[in-house]
Every structure is written in C-alpha cells, then in structure tokens.
Image (cartoon, grey):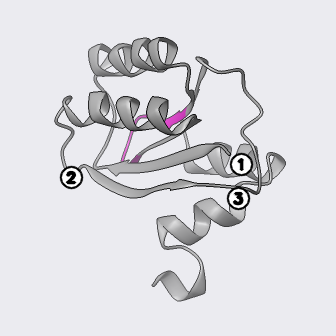
Amino acid sequence: MPFRALIKTHHMTSRKKIQAIIKSAKHHSCSVLIKTGKPPGVMMAQGTEDAVKQWVESVKRLRYKDYRLLRLEAVSAGQLSQHPGSVTEFGSMKDLSAYLEQCEVWEWWTEHMGFANGGR
C-alpha cells in the first residue's frame, strides 16, 4: 500500500533547497509534487513507507520557515501520476489543485490542507 506525506511551509524560493528536495526524491524513489514561490510552500510525496519517511526527514533538515507535516499515512485511494523519483514543480496553488484533481488526490489534499469542511 502506498504511503503519502503532505508538508506545508511559509514559502519555497531557495533553488538550493529545491534541488536538495529533488535529489532526495530521486535517492528515495518518491514521487514528489512541490508548489514553489509565494506563500504557502507545499510538498507532497508518495512511495513506500520507508522511502517517504526518509524523504520527510531530509526535508525537515532543510529548516523551512513554518514547516508543518500535515499528514503522513498509508493511502488506498488516488495515486500520483508520476514515476518514482520524479518531481513536478508548480508555481501556483491553482495549477497544483488542477493536477491533483486529475490524479483523484484532490479530496485528500483539500481535507488535510484544511480547505474542506469549513477549513477545520
């Protein structure tokens, strides 16, 4: 069963840190989506449990401002339509949201980002 992580930060603008995220995704064979630029910064990774947990630890070491691990869990519904080790970067929440809707991960994402059910 795939494992998924969702991380939110203040913003993601450092190309050096983004390159470290890409390198870690390749090293741990995780499919990763990132939303860069103006706040918020968002990262989602999917892969095996060990791979995702190791990827999350490598991201945590980057010391992003307002780093929050929103979710880390096994998932059964929806799959990222990427190959393991690949990273897709988005410049806006709108573009990320549209991509996630196509992958049938949008409901999971909106719930754990706090957008669903009145922003709980």
* Disc 3 to disc 1, C-alpha distance: 5 Å
* Disc 2 to disc 1, C-alpha distance: 23 Å
**Residue 15 picture location, percent across and down:** 33, 16
Point out the tag, 2 or 1, that comes first from the N-terminus: 2
Q: Please name the amino acid that badge 2 sits on.
A: Asp
Name the element at disc 3: helix
Residue visible at 68% across and 45% down? 1
Name the element at disc 1: helix
Point out the tag, 2 or 3, that comes first from the N-terminus: 2
Which is nearer the eye, 88 or 76? Answer: 76
**Residue 97 picture location, percent across and down:** 67, 52
Q: Which mark is residue 58?
A: none
Residue visible at 71% across and 48% down? 100
- Vertical relation: 38 (above or below) 110: above
Question: Cβ–Cβ below 8 Å for labels 3 and 1?
Answer: yes
Which is nearer the eye, 32 or 16? Answer: 32
In the picture of the structure, the residue carrying the numbered disc 3 is 106
Instruction: Give, as a single range, the part of the protein colored magenta.
Output: 33-41
* Disc 2 to disc 3, C-alpha distance: 23 Å
Question: Cβ–Cβ below 8 Å for labels 2 and 1?
Answer: no
In the picture of the structure, the residue carrying the numbered disc 1 is 100
Q: Is residue 76 left or right of residue 11?
A: right
- Is 34 inside the magenta-drawn segment? yes
